[in-house]
Every structure is written in C-alpha cells, then in structure tokens.
Image (cartoon, rainbow, N blue to C red):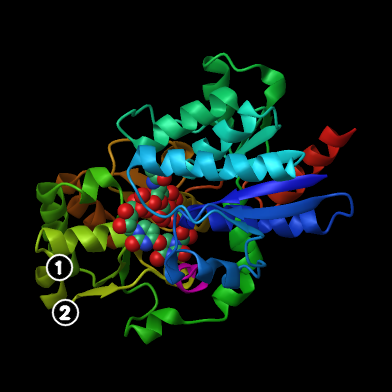
Amino acid sequence: MKIHLIAAARPNFMKIAPLYHELVSRPNLEPVIVHTGQHYDLNMSDVFFRDFKLPAPHIHLGVGSGTHAQQTGNVMIAYEKVLMDTRPDLVVVVGDVNSTVAATLAAVKLGIKTAHLEAGLRSGDRTMPEEINRIVTDAIADYLWTPSKDGNENLEKEGVAREKITLVGNIMIDSLEMARPVIESKAVFLEYGFQKEQYGLVTLHRPSNVDDPDSLERLCLELARISRELPLIFPIHPRTRANLKKFKLDQVLKENKAIRLIEPLGYIHFMNLVFNARLLITDSGGVQEETTYLGIPCLTLRPNTERPVTTTIGTNRLCTPATLFGHVVTVLDGQRSSGSIPELWDGRTAGRVADRIESLMV
Ligand code: UD1
Ligand code: UDP
C-alpha cells in the first residue's frame, strides 16, 4: 500500500516523522514523503529532516511563498500531476496549513482516499486562515483522525458520519517522546547565557499579532516590560522578522539586552529551551500542546484556541497584550498548577494510525 505523507511547513514535519518511521517498519506499507515546499529555509524545513532522521523528501513540489490563493492553487496544480502519475492508495494530510487543504482537494477530486491527521480542531474563529483550512479539509477527507475528544464532538456537530472519525491521540507527543533522549542530553540554554528555569521563551507568528504595526508594537512593548522581570529568548519566525523590519521595530528589540533575538531553531534545540523554560509566551498551536504535556506554564496571545483541552486541563492560558504581564507575574509568584495530560497524548498515536491504515487494506 503506497501512502503519501504531505509535509509543507514547520509544524508538519514533526507530525509526519513518527508516522513515517512507524509505517516504514510495517512490511505492507510504503510511505512516500511529499514536500510541497511551503516552507523552504534551512531552519524552517531541512533541519527537521535531520532532527527526526527522515530521508530527503521523495517528491518535492517547490511551491514556495505567495498569497493564500497562489499557494493553495500552486500546490493543487503541482500535486494533481503527481497524483495522476503515481496514484497512491492513500494520502495523509496533517494539521491546518494551506498545503493541507490544497493536497486534500487535489486528491479527493481524483477519487484517491485521503485521511486528515489532527482532524476536528476548531477555534470557532473564521478570521484565522487555518480555521478555513480545517473546516474544508474535514468536510471532504475520507478519514478523520482526531487528537482529542473535542475533535470528535466538533465533527459530529458538523454532521460528519461517525464511522469516518477515529480518536487516535496527539502525534506531537510521539515526536517529543521520540526525540526526548537527545533533547535531554543537551543544555542549549547555557549557549545563550541562561540558567535552567531562569528565562522565558517566546514565539510569535500569527498574522493577527504580527502583520499589524500597532499590534506588533504593543507586543514588543509588553515583552520589554516582562524582560525586566524575566529575561526572554525569542527565536523569530520569518514572517515576524520581516514585519519587525518593515515597521522599524527590530532596532528597539535588539537594543534590549534582556531579550535575545535569535533565528528559528531546529526541533531538538528548540525543545531543549522549552524543557528548561520558566514559561512560554506564544501564539503557536504546537507549543500550546507541548507545554501542556510537559506541565510548563504557557501564555497564549490569542482570543481563542482550537486546542481547548490545553486550557481546561493543561497549563495554557489565553491572554491579551493587556493581561499578559499579570499572567507572567502569577507564574513567577508560583501560583500556577502543573495541569494534567489529555487522554491518548501518550506517544503511541503513530502505532494507532498505522493499525487504522492496515485495517483499511482488508
Ligand atoms: C504557516 C501556516 C501557519 C503555521 C505556520 C507555522 C498557512 C495559512 N499558515 O504560516 O498555519 O502556523 O506556517 O510556522 O498555511 N518565509 C520565509 N521562509 C520560509 C517560509 C516562509 O522567509 O521558509 C516567509 C515568506 O516571506 C512568507 C512568509 O514567511 O511569505 C509566510 O509564510 P507562509 O508559509 O505563507 O505562512 P506562515 O506565516 O509561515
Ligand atoms: N518549533 C521549532 N523551532 C522554533 C519554533 C518552533 O522547532 O524556533 C517547533 C515547535 O515544536 C512547535 C512547532 O515547531 O510546536 C510548530 O511550529 P509553529 O509554531 O511554527 O506552528 P503552529 O503549531 O502554530 O502551526
């Protein structure tokens, strides 16, 4: 059985990695990595292939950046050709990026069975491009594999037939457990002059936070205020870097010695900083999950989340720029519980997915 695994952007590589390794170990399954090229910088793409010991992509579509329609359209056009030439038995898409919905549209229209890993997540916020990608992908994919029960409930509310939905668990925890020995063998924080649990780690890249000059300036001011209480390290996403420069905010941040601005990191290095951080300030989807699993306080600069379990039972708290500082103080005062771990976030999701795939063969 030939299975295409679609990888496109940073959060996809850690989702396909455990699945690739599991599928390749099963004699009847032949995983093929298809990279759409949505992310292409060394530290946004290649580094993850090295960190997760993945082979180079078997197929590379090289679509690059563009507007939403350009990116989605270019993936569809390029991937349709590949599908017509190779006719895989199954296409697996992950997450919620533009390439996820594009590959699903191309495959489903050719009558090729398609599965969505990380199905059913909903923020309820249609101003988020990812929410549109999630809704469309789940409406047309054949198999919907969810990370948590709320995913099943969302899909059922949308009228999806129950037999299409399977709760498989959170694949991001497989990635973390797979890499844990190497992550724990390092002390990356020392390279930046920090001590264990004596710094905060920041990631920001949502258009709602970083594309508007006023929002980004406000966030920079809040980070500067927080850095007087806790030094910060900030690996900057390329979208954010470009906007900091465009809005002339980069110099202000660079002059602040308590905020270390660095390039995006590979998974092992980044996770070593997560493991040892006092707290995270973020708008990332994946980071909300990783911190919940590790019991590390996470302050998410968003009005909503498609991962509500991270706030109901995990360590995640939604913040605005106005409430962020107060949340930081609460964490530094030690007034935060360590939360608990959602069901099936156990590092064995890839095995359950591979079992599902094998059951589709009979
Ligand atoms: C994309 C996803 C988002 C995900 C994020 C993870 C969509 C709609 N968005 O957002 O859901 O959370 O990836 O990081 O699919 N760029 C580079 N080098 C790269 C990649 C991008 O310089 O390797 C720059 C380009 O200027 C590009 C911009 O970043 O225009 C944005 O890239 P894009 O993939 O369109 O969206 P992200 O913001 O990365
Ligand atoms: N990540 C990384 N290096 C970084 C920042 C993030 O390896 O410099 C990892 C981290 O594990 C995170 C994942 O990339 O969970 C997801 O990335 P991102 O925040 O870009 O995407 P999202 O999850 O918001 O879609």
Image point (52%, 23%), residue name: 154
Name the one closer to the observer, 205 or 56. Answer: 56
Q: Quadrant of the C terminus?
A: top right
Res 257 label: 2
Q: How far from the left and from the top, in percent, is residue 230?
A: 23, 69
**If you read the primary sequence from the N terminus, does the residue marked by circle 1 or circle 2 appear first?**
1
Q: Is mark 1 within 8 Å of ligand 1?
A: no
Rendering coords of residue 76 (x, y %) = 52, 39
Question: Camera-side residue: 321 or 155?
Answer: 155
Camera sees residue 230: yes
Q: Nearer the viewer, residue 133 or 294?
A: 133
Kind of residue at disc 1: Asp
In space, the residues marked 1 and 2 are separated at their CA atoms by: 13 Å
User: Is 148 drawn above or below residue 126 in the view shown?
Assistant: below
Q: Secondary structure at mark 1?
A: helix
The quadrant of the picture occupied by the N terminus is: top right
Query: Which residue matches tag 1?
Result: 250
Q: Main secondary structure of the magenta part?
A: helix
Point out the residue furthest to the top here. Answer: 159
| Amino acid, disc 2 | Lys
Of the numbered discs in the image, which one, if any, rests on residue 329?
none
Q: Which residues are magenta?
A: 266-271
